Image (cartoon, rainbow, N blue to C red):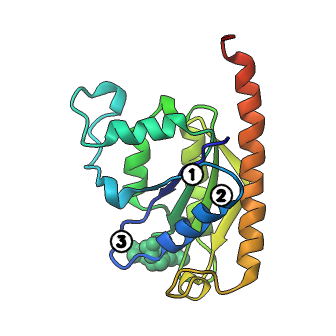
Amino acid sequence: MLTIPIILGSTRRGRQSPKVARFLHQRLQAAGVQSELLDLADYDFPIMEERLSKRDDPPPRLREFAAKVAAADALCIVTPEYNNGIPGVLKNALDYLWPEYARKPFGIATVSSGGFGGLYALSALRQVVIGLRGFTIPAAFPVSNVEKAFPDDGSPADASLEKRADKFLAELIWFAEAIQARKQKDAPAA
Ligand SMILES: Cc1cc2nc3c(=O)[nH]c(=O)nc-3n(C[C@H](O)[C@H](O)[C@H](O)COP(=O)(O)O)c2cc1C
């Protein structure tokens, strides 16, 4: 079974992105993937002073977060767009780790209250993922007008979102399976 956690990169008061993250989480589970929501608001990491590998006094729960990223076959990130980029809290959390990301596929979902779905954030995060030595998959899940797309109870307003989400997640699963199979060739025989 594949393991694909979802990193939620919004900690803003009154944030909308959790609705998108919970929705993708449910759809990943429905697709038979083991998934957990890693909400950066719960982790509350301080400003990064050094990577985990160089710290003997890591912030609380950083090792736990690192272990979940290390155990993942792929990662899904849900990020809002702030000032044409990604939130500092997300970049800060990502910068703490390094070996944990190597050769992992990343699927990116972006969230915006406007009509462009956070495409600048998508582009910015793709650059970061390459820096982390991950693989940014070609498919993405941009959500425009999030408050209308996911009204209060958090279910999508329109069935087309489900269709788009499943197509995006199917691509992420495809890459996760392909890379998992290749990594198994490198693994020492049991
Ligand atoms: C500091 C800040 C900057 C923002 N900048 C942008 C932006 O550049 N482009 C955009 O489409 N929306 C922008 N927005 C609106 C967000 O897309 C909107 O708040 C959305 O709900 C973000 O997700 P969140 O609710 O999880 O924070 C910004 C919002 C904040 C708080």
Residue identified by numbered label 1: 35
Q: Residue at x 57, y 45 (%)?
A: 129
> Which label's residue is closer to the chain start, 2 or 1?
2
- Which circle, 1 or 3, is nearer the viewer? 1
Q: CA distance from mark 2 to mark 1?
A: 7 Å
Query: Which amino acid type is marked by label 1?
Result: Ser
Q: Indicate yes or no: mark 2 CB to ligand 1 under 8 Å.
A: no
Q: Indicate yes or no: mark 3 CB to ligand 1 under 8 Å.
A: yes
Q: CA distance from mark 1 to mark 3?
A: 23 Å
Query: Which amino acid type is marked by label 3?
Result: Arg
The correct choice, above or below, for 13 with respect to 157 in the image is: above
Q: Are marks 2 and 3 in contact (CB under 8 Å)?
A: no
The correct choice, above or below, for 171 with respect to 114 in the image is: above
Residue identified by numbered label 3: 12
Horizontally, is 166 left or right of 15 in the view? right
> Which label's residue is closer to the chain start, 1 or 3?
3
The answer to which image quadrant residue 56 occupies is top left
Residue identified by numbered label 2: 28
